[in-house]
Image (cartoon, rainbow, N blue to C red):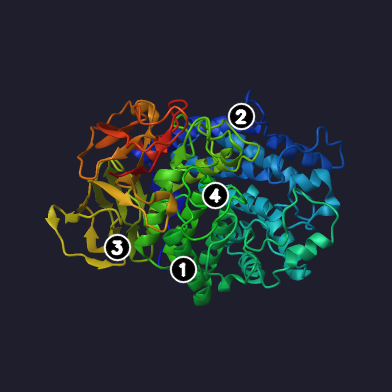
Amino acid sequence: MKQQRQIDVKRFESTEGFIYQYQKLIKEVVIPYQYAVLHDQVEGVEKSHVVANFENAAKAVRGEDIGDGFYGMVFQDSDAAKWLEAVAYSLVNFPDTDLEAKADSLIDKIEAAQDTDGYLNTYYTIKDKDKRWTNLLEGHELYCAGHMMEAAVAYYEATGKDKLLRVMQKNAAHIYQHFVTEGHEGYPGHPEVELALLRLYHATGDEKCLALAKHFIDVRGVNNRFYEEEAARRDWSVWGNDATDYDYQQSGKPVREQRDATGHSVRAVYLYTGMADLAAQTEDQELLDACRHLFESITDRRMYVTGGIGSTVEGEAFTVDYDLPNDTAYAETCASIGLMFFASRMLEAEVDSKYADVMERAFYNTVLAGMQLDGKRFFYVNPLEVLPGISGEIKTHRHDLPQRPGWYACACCPPNVARCIASLGKYAYGENERTAFIHLFVEGRITFENGMVLECKTGYPYEFKVEYKVTKGSGEMAVRRPDWSSSYRILVNGTKVAAEEKNGYYYLKDLKAGDKVEIFLDDEIKKLYASTKIASDTGYVTLQRGPLVYCVEGTDNEMDVLSLSYAENGSMKAEAYEPAFLGGTVRITADGYRTCEGESLSSTGNYSMIKPEKMPCRITAIPYYTWGNRGLNQMRVWLPER
């Protein structure tokens, strides 16, 4: 039984504030830009061909000449799905008949590309129908189906239109027929469809969707040699994945026996999200217990301070506990989005602030950093240290780019960021029959199913007073206390109240229309120290204020961050909010030192027996999510403390 659930996306209305400005950017810039990219209308960026693939697949279904065929990655269809999902959420906040018509037109193309038996995938429909379902390891058929199911649910919930929903119900029936009715062995190479089938089940009540999600979760890893056996049956490959790498594909053990987060980090958290949702839906305590272990494995031992996960480019993967290098970090944007999904589903299974704390850390740092402030450039990888001339250039650091590209051949992250930001309201607020839950502090108007309506006013994440006014109805509110806030005060109608605290949430009972709840959080700058088990950060410190982790860039610090160190007992100051600086932000200035080599190094090498001088200086730090917006720059999250 779920302790609470996400609110319906239509029950949150963004009005003003930090998130509103981002959602407005998604609507006005990101969605139109990505629409043009999907139609190959943007010069100088990686070709997408997504829409043309659907058009050509429709021709193939009709037996016509397919023209220029298929172009792109095997999972190219998913870019269209995520764009549609972002559009759906955006239409809730910003109704737009022209945009809705464009989405409807794309949905028509998708419907036309579906085969008569319900199969839907442009790669195989165009390239080779005989290879369907024969390469689950690499083929991404189920991954693409999953993203399209999510888009169908979102578009139905936002607009009431069910054309794509019916397409994907037919597709789900086809998949059920193949894997359950006909009993073909296998499970997704890239998990995603599991969580999507559960979303489709919640939206439609179709029991086959629930059964199919459970099937894929239950059979995973039972035959851990499945991918090897599958590979032996075919003489072709998409890109040569190692079928014996059980860790990479989370298939070494049945899911209920898994304890450590392993392998490709996006695949992992998408799988864990489906597991957590299924566990809560079916009251499967063994499965929920596995999810708890996996969440702790990630957040206690394998997560960056920015909420990034996946520490190596090799397999875009988790490695081992405490291996968190800064300059070669992978920390894919999609992985942090997936971590938010996982945390949100765990929060539904059991209300505990640690899950919302992780959602917040991932969102305000890595997820937002994945997109340039102008909405037109994107990071796939999110390093915690960048050095021009090394980052993005030498072989070991080629993946850690110092500047965001406009698009990618593998373009999973840009539309993923768009759908995440556009739908943040449903992660911020939850409900059950009795209680309205405040997980994240997001300004807007929230309508709960029990009839209570809240209006939130706040300058968060740069201001630390959050106000909720009950404008309609009555009931109970549960408000999270963030893990970073040392002080915490709640007033109801100007009076301090004694609220019951449970697992990091304060429960305010018997609220009624006209009541005002004020929450006062800690605005102090905190120094964060890493575990001594993390080799990359021993003796280093980073700064955090509210949910925002800070970094230093060369532009603010004489173009050299490598010589900087924070002063152990120095002063730190949050400067005044600057609306025109980096989209509106607060700089931190702190006492520190600059190491000056002078004549200490010999003329023959990099090393010297003469101690370098240490000169006092003032260091300027900016929020991590804003880095990389001012040209080529050095950047560091962690600095030594002296």
* Residue 269 visible, this angle: yes
Q: Residues under labels 2 and 3: Cα distance?
A: 44 Å
- Name the amino acid type tagged 1: Arg
Label 2 residue SS: helix
Q: Nearer the viewer, residue 372 or 166?
A: 372
Label 3, residues with CA under 10 Å away: few <14, some 14-19, many ≥20: many
Residue furthest top in the image? 43
Label 3 residue SS: strand
Q: Which mark is in front, 3 or 1?
A: 1
- Name the amino acid type tagged 3: Tyr
Picture layout, residue 569 above or below residue 173:
above
- Name the amino acid type tagged 2: Ala
Label number found at residue 128: none
* Residue at (35, 25) in percent of width and height: 558
Seen in the image, is 178 located left or right of residue 417?
A: right
Q: Which residue is mark 4?
A: 154
Seen in the image, is 520 located left or right of residue 378?
A: left
Q: Which residue is mark 1?
A: 292
The quarter of the image holding the C terminus is top left
* Residue 588 visible, this angle: no
Residue contact between numbered discs 4 and 3, judged by CB atoms under 8 Å: no
Q: Which residue is mark 3?
A: 505
Q: Nearer the viewer, residue 304 or 443?
A: 304
Label number found at residue 36: 2
Q: Report which quarter residue 482 is drawn in.
A: bottom left
- Name the amino acid type tagged 4: Ala
